[in-house]
Image (tube, coloured by chain):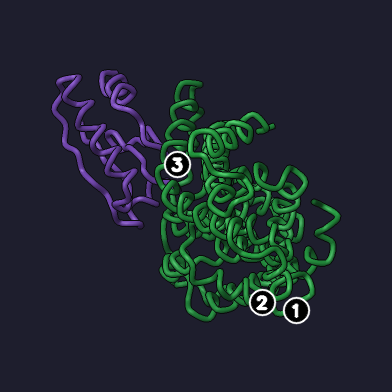
Amino acid sequence: MFNWLDYLAQAFVTKVIGLSMESKWGSSIHFFIYDTIKIIILLSIMIFLISYIRSYFPPEKTKRILAKFSGIKGNIMASLLGIVTPFCSCSSVPIFIGFVEAGVPLGLTFSFLITSPIVNEAAFIILLGLFGWKLAVVYVITGVIVGVLGGLIIGKMKMEKQVEEYVYNTKVADIDPKELTINERVSFATQNVKDIVKRIWLFLIIGIGIGAAIHGWVPEDFLASYAGENNPFAVLIAVVCGIPLYSNAMGTIPIAQALIGKGVGIGTALSFMMAVTALSAPELVLLRKVIKPRLIVWFVIVTGIGILMTGYLFNFIGHLLM
Amino acid sequence: MVIKILGGGCKNCQNLYKNTMEALEIVGIEAEVLKVEDINEIMSYGVMKTPALVVDEEVKIMGRVAKSKELAKLFKS
């Protein structure tokens, strides 16, 4: 799909700059140019499309749908809705309060909260561009599985008392989400593209820069021997490193690509990305407004274990997908 | 006309506020514009995704930053 871009980038490096594609600098610069442009193109087109679809699923509508569900069907529904409902960290508190007050079971709310940030459009698009559709789809499926399992377990733990009391007392009006006109949907979608690109371009460039350096300088087998599929601790380390990182996962993806190219297990890389997005420290700080510490701790533990398990699973079967 | 901008102070909320002021200038109407940042008050309108725009206690825009042109049309009606 992007062969033309690869060709152009190679031509630029070899003809304009005058470096060989075999040299460390040459190969790194090519990686950098190719990746940056490819990602921004993909991002813009697909964020637009996905945002347009999401304009049909405002959280106020999702709330009404979920209030009618329960049981594992509800968890699956919640995770799936988490994918299509536009979600930003700043809405996690109102969404939590809104769901709880509408009678959505706590477990379902958590399925939503776990899957939503993992399956964010930019991560999906970048995975699509860097690893192909098979891995991107698998990432989405694992995001749903981790969300459903996490929500199921938290639901069974009956931690309703670990929600701050005021949440149950908040009056939330039930309003009809207005249907948008096509112009309004287009405006919403373009706004999202601008927002996301503006928010992440620096992280992307830095991430691609690091990825480029790894690509050019780290020897082929170095990482394979330390963090390859056979190292049982690699996934654990990846998840633990992911948690305190800022929630912007985009910059991690080019790094993940370069690492995988150098022999790091796919499951390890996927776990890292999921840990960064689902368990971001800033998001936990926000959730503290509505959830007491004990539930936050269990949220991290349950989700962390889910991510760990999928990480190990994909290290096991990952080569079938690439 | 009383306009309320619902939102916790993030950049999108500020942009909606800016566009609102611009729109009011375009249409030449005077209105009271209030910023609502308290989560309880925001939720009392049923809004779950900010920013949102409320005109005379009716929620007109939810979860996105409307451009000044769109807001101007809204205020005129």
Give SS at disc 1: loop
Compared with A162, A258 (above or below) is: above
Residue A236: mark: 2
Can residue A54 be spotted in the picture? no
Do the residues at discs 1 and 3 belong to one chain? yes
User: Which percent across, then down, holds residue A273?
Assistant: 61, 61
Query: Which chain is green in the rendering?
Result: A
- Looking at the picture, tell me which residue is in the foreground, A29 or A45: A29
- Give the alpha-carbon distance from disc 1 to disc 2, as whole Å: 8 Å
Name the amino acid type tagged 1.
Pro
Q: How crowded is mark 3: few (under 14 residues within 10 Å), some or many (20 or more)?
A: some
User: Which percent across, then down, holds residue A209?
Assistant: 49, 54
- Residue that appears at 27% across and 22% down: B72
The chain ID associated with circle 1 is A
Residue A197: mark: 3
Name the amino acid type tagged 2.
Leu
- Give the alpha-carbon distance from disc 3 to disc 2, as whole Å: 31 Å
Number of the front mark, 1 or 3: 1
- Give the alpha-carbon distance from disc 1 to disc 3, as whole Å: 36 Å
User: Which percent across, then down, holds residue B16?
Assistant: 30, 37
Determine which residue is flagged by label 1: A232
Q: Which colour represents chain B?
A: purple
Callout 1–callout 2 Cβ contact below 8 Å: yes
